[in-house]
Image (spheres, helix red, strand yellow):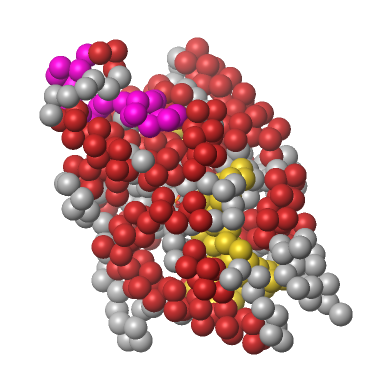
Amino acid sequence: MSQSSGKNHVAVLAFPFGCHPWPLLNLASKLASAAPDVRFSFLNTAKSNQKLSATSGAHLPHNLKSYDVVDGVPEGHVLTPGNPLEEVELFLEAAPESFRKGMDMVVAETGQQKITCILNDAFLVFGCDLAADMHVKWVPLYVPAPYDLSAHIYSALLHETYAKACGGGEAHGNGGAVGDLNPIDKTLDAIPGLSVMRFGDLPPEILQEILQGNQSNCSPIFARTLRRISEVLPRANAVVMNSFRELNSTILTDDLKSKFQDILYVGFPTLIVPTPPLPPSHSDATGCLPWLDEQKPTSVAYISFGTVAAVPPHEFAALAEALEASCVPFLWSLRENFKAFLPNGFLERTRKQGKIVPWAPQAYVLSHKAVGVYITHCGYHSVFESIVGEVPMICRPILGDGKMNGRMVEDVWEIGVRVEGGVFTKKGMVKSLELVLGHDDQHRRRMKEKIRDLKELVVKAAGPDGIDKDKAQTVTTKIQNN
Ligand code: UDP
């Protein structure tokens, strides 16, 4: 009898965009190792499953199996280039039915082993109804930062306080200098634990709704989905957070705790604390690590905007011009379609100065001694990979929780700087590079010390696996029927 033929069967449902599937798969993998009698079935689109196996190289435990579900893109339909939300929209429209059919298929394949729990990405808000219909437990994983979840929970109050601020009503923070202050720059004092943030730091989907009076630019179904998060999560048996409690303010964690039946901070399931030996060669197909071996210590600028984000074409060009002007060696993870935005002749002129790749083994790159600065979109995972690598950041937040992460990096943790004016310009970037890589040893030393302290906290809380073993154990208890 297989060890996983016990009565518990967890269906793990992925949101197949951006970085989202990685932490969910890693969490499922760690839970499966901790609970060998429980069967885990990971359901995701074929495209995303392929990407996961190409980029993670993770070995799945015997009781965790991946399955493909349909992605909602009609046969023969050609996705519009430059409109990534179209794919999200088509997926979300079809997703409740796709996952329902996927679960039926899995149950049939496993010899009628019924699903006993749904563990899903919290963006799949319909998981709540699916679990209720099936009379099974529901445990969602919230992938972005905890302060991002607070912003979603308090979006109605944010609307209200912003309207007040515009109407010259009650003052919000900033030492009382309210008179001329643009409401966008006002602090979020009304929200527990968010007083360090400003309206302008809010995730774009929330900010747009506030600024445009509920008229989101976001696709209607995605906007609706995000709005439902705060409504459905209180119904979960437990909400799992992709974070450590110790990293967040007590006001924030206490407040979130009061909103849900249970909340479990497991750590970062994807976090790697690289230690020699280096990863097998397949995970460095683009040869980044040997190239870094040839560079001087803390000399290289690593650039990456994560899995989906992009800046406008003129900013790609400005960043490239700044790199060239400052003569800083660079390693740039740049998707092929963005190369067209680089200045004429840039690739030829910088052949010796830099290396451009479509994908880098980022966690290992950031832990390489040659890397001195990370020019980042402030993606949540990227920021923590930089912390573990002890690399200060130059931040150009673009989407999701990026601006909130950037605020934490610069103002709270003091381990990086945001680009001047919030966008890449040649002059601003040359200045930022000088600041972080240049001769102001004191500034650099201070940032390094702060990063080391944070890294210590992360590693102590997580261990080298990025996940708190006791908390993982608590999650395995939550997902099982006794
Ligand atoms: N990543 C990588 N190589 C690349 C670009 C990105 O390994 O060339 C990984 C990165 O290490 C991180 C994830 O992709 O773990 C991006 O997640 P993040 O939350 O930072 O940003 P998102 O893609 O969600 O905007």
Q: Main secondary structure of the magenta part?
A: loop
Quarter of the view holding residue 167: top left
Q: Is residue 90 visible?
A: yes
Q: Nearer the viewer, residue 288 or 159?
A: 159
Q: Is residue 309 magenta?
A: no
- Quadrant that contains the C terminus: bottom right
x, y percentage for residue 410? 42, 26
Looking at the image, residue 47 lies above or below residue 257: below
Q: Is residue 454 above or below residue 399?
A: above
The picture places residue 291, in percent across and down from the top left corner, at 57, 46
Q: How many marks?
A: 0
Decide which of 326, 302 is in the foreground and name it: 302
Q: Residue at x 51, y 59 (%)?
A: 121
Q: Left or right? Give the position of 26 relative to 236.
A: right
Q: Quadrant of residue 395?
A: top left
- Residue at 30 percent across and 74 percent down: it is 79
Residue at 73% of width from left, 40% of height from top?
Answer: 463
Where does the N terminus fall, quadrant-wise?
Answer: bottom right
**Image x and y of residue 175, in percent:** 29, 13
The foreground one among 195 and 391 is 195
Image height of 23 relative to 196, above or below: below
Please give the range of residues in magenta. 177-196
Residue 290 visible, this orientation = no
Q: Is residue 178 magenta?
A: yes
**Residue at horizontal 31%, vertical 26%?**
187
